[in-house]
Amino acid sequence: MEEQTIKLLQDSFVQVMAIRSEAAALFYERLFVLDPTLKPLFSDSDMRAQEMKLMAALALVVGKLRQLDEVIPVLETLAVKHVGYGVRESHYDTVGQALIQTLSLAFGERFTPELRTAWLAAYGAISGVMIAAARRGGMVIAAE
């Protein structure tokens, strides 16, 4: 990933972290609007705790964009855990849409095409690692 893209992502994430509770709640709101069938996957979850886990995972990845190799094992483990929760490959697209919508709503006009492209690239890399790990683990996560 280019240095300019990394800086753009990290600078924007600082702003997201300033409103992390609101951003995380908005993310799950968008996720459940996009695919209401995902809500039961969280029926036993403390959503406040889940929101904080989301932000911590994003902070870890965004903070390590220059050392992504260090984060790959964490993402792979997370992917296998998510399969156990009922996550399917098609859900990764929905999560990506929810993330981009959340950022767009949070940033408004400041969510420039350049920033959008950077976040899409970052999410594509993350989801690609996670999907590949779930597949390697022999888990069935094929799209419905």
Image: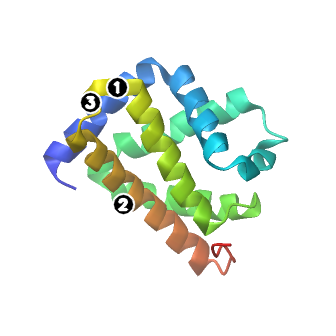
Which type of secondary structure does the marked residue at label 3 adopt? helix
Marks 1 & 2, CB-CB < 8 Å contact: no
The residue located at (61%, 47%) in the rendering is 34
Which type of secondary structure does the marked residue at label 2 adopt? helix
Q: Which mark is residue 142?
A: none
Quick one: 128 or 92, which is closer to the camera?
Answer: 92
Residue type beneath disc 3:
Asp
Mark 2 sits on what residue?
Answer: 69
Residue type beneath disc 2:
Asp
Residue type beneath disc 1:
Gly
- Alpha carbons under labels 1 and 2: distance apart: 32 Å
Q: Which mark is residue 108?
A: 1
The residue located at (59%, 65%) in the rendering is 90
Mark 3 sits on what residue?
Answer: 11
Give coordinates of residue 113: x percent, y percent: 23, 42
The residue located at (36%, 40%) in the rendering is 63
